[in-house]
Image (cartoon, coloured by chain):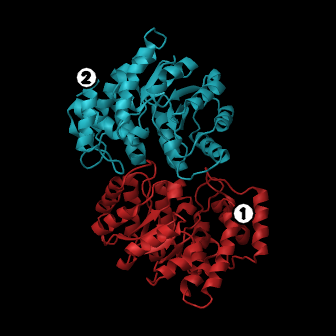
Chain colours: A cyan, B red
Amino acid sequence: MSHENGRVWSPVITPFAADLSPDIDLYVKHCRWLADNDVGLAVFGTNSEANSLGLEEKTQLLDALVEAGIAADRLMPGTGVCALPDTVALTRHAVRIGVSGVLMLPPFYYKGVGDEGLFRYYSEVMERVGDSRLRIYLYHIPAVSQVPLSLDLIGRLLEAYPNNIVGLKDSSGDWANTQAVIERFGAQGFDVYAGSETFLLQTLRAGGAGCISATANVNPRAISQLGKTWRADDADQQQAALVRIRKIFERFPVIAALKAATARYSQDEQWAVLRPPLVELNPQQREDLYALLDEAGFDMPGLG
Amino acid sequence: MSHENGRVWSPVITPFAADLSPDIDLYVKHCRWLADNDVGLAVFGTNSEANSLGLEEKTQLLDALVEAGIAADRLMPGTGVCALPDTVALTRHAVRIGVSGVLMLPPFYYKGVGDEGLFRYYSEVMERVGDSRLRIYLYHIPAVSQVPLSLDLIGRLLEAYPNNIVGLKDSSGDWANTQAVIERFGAQGFDVYAGSETFLLQTLRAGGAGCISATANVNPRAISQLGKTWRADDADQQQAALVRIRKIFERFPVIAALKAATARYSQDEQWAVLRPPLVELNPQQREDLYALLDEAGFDMPGLG
């Protein structure tokens, strides 16, 4: 990926077979379609149902992508889980195959942990991986992880590990926070990604790097287009068009809606399967989603 | 363990070596001391830092206990993690070695999941383990997991899997909820454990099974004594004495305080280590804790 600002990544949805095992062929196919539509592959994100996948499954999926010829530098896998040794194992594997970076959740079981504990956790991961190629994007998603990453923590990590801590994804949905992170750390080359394309133009204008967004799974071309042309005259119009599509998906449980749309436009019903505890859209929800997408003239060209 | 009511379990704290790996010798020693003090071993609970341990580490620790001669029917390991295959793998292993039961968290990354998704998750675990010896205690700890287990969900699981779903640990701290679960399901032989000895007497008088409590790591004899003699005349006095000790630990981050106390009374400083993101008590906190324990005449006889 170029290191110009305007980069867009998709937290790639994970297809499951009838027995709930990852469907590797379908996965590779979707990743290729996303890459062809100029978005990076932030596999194992929240929208990938990554925390419903075991360590071994994630390792196998990474290997399958590389074996299928996906360039490793197009990958930014999520590697942060609750247990230090598992985070270290997956991160080490990801670095070894040459990924662009890793997106790292804090350990998220214990709540109310302080900055000192989180600092020790991230430090321990970096010390154990012990590889100068390790590039960590911190993952701030307080509504889901319930473990926020404070500005002080980011600053402390950046000071101690300037070569390993390279950016952050802000999925707080709180623009004031995104802006504060960019203002405080952006000038040092710290890459701040918005967690949704809703904030893409704002983020880029403020000096951020781009976005990593759920809906980049279904609307990659238009989102990456704004990433490339955000200085153009029609940028605000492009942004408004992205928001219109985004808002349709936000009316439903988002992961289920992304999969239902992908099932429809790829004509492959296998996409509709989610791994428990998540569930698929019910028939009425699917009908409503499809009607809204048709009304908006939405399509996923080249899929399936 | 006897199936009389009045059972007490300890979510066994996990000792770590200087390199943060589990200290197996110290672990076995502590488990023996707890068993000698008549509490069951609910290893891999919240207070065990279980979600900071990897799947492989937990498997090794279980095996080490059995190899050390701890009777498997004294064990109730926590086996619920976020990813279905990992929960299945650890649960299957636990059943195979003959544990008394397993304590199972819901998958806790995704928030706001509905009963249908949780039902499917637990069902899938039971179907995959596929063993009539599997006895699941559901683990309701909403403040930490952020994924509560509703009465409707419990009822639905109990109806579908009456032989596998055998009880619940209620760590909500909300007596009205504990009472409601006992009233609705207790008569069917469903074992309800309070998540703290603060509620032990109330739980037993209401028809519950006992408690699974953090402080049973440090005060096992007195708690198990109330479990055995809760119909005696001095039961309320015993309960009050338990609460006095409990309240001391609750003034501090509890897991760190349990470990600091164990370090002191075993004279083994190794116990003071926690795995990140948790941190040990600072020197002032330790001093305060020890002063309060001395004032209360507290001891952990026979330890170390």
Residue appearing at x 25%, y 22% in the figure? A302
- Front-lying residue, B47 or B93: B47
Within-10-Å neighbours for mark 2: few <14, some 14–19, many 20+: few
Residue B149 against residue A95 in the figure, above or below: below
- Front-lying residue, A137 or B269: A137
Circle 1 SS class? helix
Proximity of marks 1 and 2: CB atoms separated by less than 8 Å: no
Residue A132 visible, this orientation: no
Give the chain of mark 1: B
Residue appearing at x 63%, y 61% in the figure? B255
Task: Please state which amino acid type lies under the numbered disc 1.
Answer: Glu
| Mark 1 → mark 2, Cα distance in angstroms | 63 Å
Task: Please state which amino acid type lies under the numbered disc 2.
Answer: Gly
Disc 2 designates what residue? A302
Residue B49: image x %, image y %?
A: 56, 58
Quarter of the image with the C terminus of chain A is: top left
Residue A298 against residue A83 in the figure, above or below: above
Circle 2 SS class? loop
Give the chain of mark 2: A
- Front-lying residue, B230 or A28: B230
Within-10-Å neighbours for mark 1: few <14, some 14–19, many 20+: few
Residue B193: image x %, image y %?
A: 48, 73
In-image side of A70 versus A119 (left or right): left
Residue A213: image x %, image y %?
A: 43, 30
Q: Quadrant of residue B128?
A: bottom left
